[in-house]
Structure formats: C-alpha cells, structure tokens
Amino acid sequence: MINTLNKIEVVTDFKHLQIREITDTGVYHRRTLSPNAILAEDEHQEVKDKAEELWTDEVKASWATFQAEQQAEMEAE
Amino acid sequence: MSGIIGGAGSKSGVIGETELDYETGVWTPTFDNMTLTPNSGGWVSGTYQKIDNLVIAMVHIMNATSTGSNSSTMFLPFTNGPKRGTVNGTTGYGAFSYDNTTGIVTENNNYVTFLSDVAGSGWVTASLRTTTSLYLHTLITYYI
C-alpha cells in the first residue's frame, strides 16, 4: 500500500470497514470493505487484523441475508 | 454568505457565522462481490466533499473491467444518516442489467442500491454487468 493508513471505522451491524488513508500527495482517500471482500496481499496489516477479528461466518451470513432482504424490500416499493 | 473553509483535507471553517466541518478527498467506488480494474488509460475513482452533514460523491469509472458476481450495491465514503439519499444522475455505457438506472442510499447504510423503473414490473434492482468495457459516471448526495 502506497497510501498511509489514517483511520479505520467499523460501521453498520455488518462490520464494514470504512477506511481513510492519506495519499502520497497529501489527499484523503476513502474506501469501504464489506465482510465478503477479498483483501489484497498488500493490504494494511491493521486492516487485515480487524477483518480477521470481526468478519466471522455469522457476520458474513448476516450481511448476505440482509442484502437479499433489502433487494426484496426495494422491489416491493 | 461568503467565508473560508480551510484547504484540502479535513478542516473546519466558518461561512458567515456558521461553523462547518469540511472534508474533501478521493475514494474508490467498490461494488459488493465485484472487482473493478482500470484498463490501460482508464479510471476507477471517485471524489467526495463532506460539508457538515451533506456528502456529495461522484463516481468516475472510465474504460474499466468488472469481474465477479453482478451486484447492485456500491459502497460510499461515509455512512448515510436516517433519511434516504439519492443518485442524482447516472451515465453509463451498458453498465447495468437495466437501462435508465437510478439509485437510493437507504437509511443508515453505507451504500447505493442501483434501481431501474421497468414498465410493468415497477422497481427492479439493477446489477452492474461484468464487462471489459465499463463506463459509469454518477453523482450521489446524502446527509449523514
């Protein structure tokens, strides 16, 4: 990772990792990782550790179920 | 009113007599269960501004390859507040499974669900296609 890790926020019930980094030009860079994301080999170790800690099979299943429910709800509106 | 709000990055400032939190930067738009890779000369990027509770996010995907499971869920730089946010315009080139795609940022979630109003079917979720020629430009606004 070229960017410097600045902040990891754990958001929603599904333990999404909302990451803020600082680029080599000093600009903020944000990205969000969901529990079914495949982390890059050069991902920040802190992010890998957080994912390992939080993304249990239960959380992953819960996120998949929620997605299906949300889709059904949207299409019913 | 006029005023000064710092420079790039996370600042606070004052417009008139109102103190505001302000952050600007770039972000990487990601779709659930999908990988987007820019082709030679292409882009997969986004820009955002957060002015107090208002987030304005733009997606700039040009000449990219999308792989994985087709998804209608695109993650945002900040988590939405208790009111729905909107996709204010989407320009894509065969990007989604349906034409005339718009989208909603649902309450307290951190992603856009892309939708299309299909005659006779009502709202259907519009999934990003897997393609080697993805073009997508979108403006999204919401309150955190």
Image: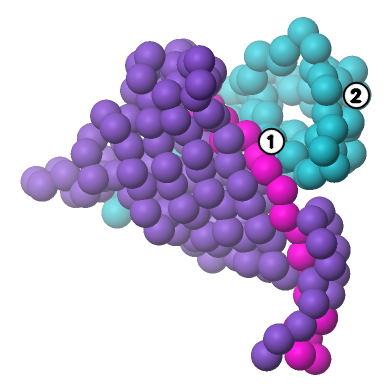
Chain colours: A cyan, B purple
Residue A13: x %, y % from top left: 69, 41
- Secondary structure at numbered mark 1: strand
Residue A66: x %, y % from top left: 52, 36
Which of the two residues, A72 or B15, is positioned nearer the viewer here? B15
- Secondary structure at numbered mark 2: helix
Main SS of the magenta segment?
strand
Stretch of the chain drawn in magenta = B14-34
Dot 2 alpha-carbon crowd within 10 angstroms: few under 14, some 14 to 19, many 20 or more? few
Residue B106: x %, y % from top left: 50, 53
Residue that numbered label 2 is attached to: A46
Q: Which mark is residue B99?
A: none
Residue that numbered label 1 is attached to: A31
On-image quarter of the C terminus of chain B: bottom right
Identify the subunit bearing mark 2: A
Q: Quadrant of residue B65?
A: top left
Q: How far separated are the C-alphas under marks 1 and 2? A: 15 Å
Identify the subunit bearing mark 1: A
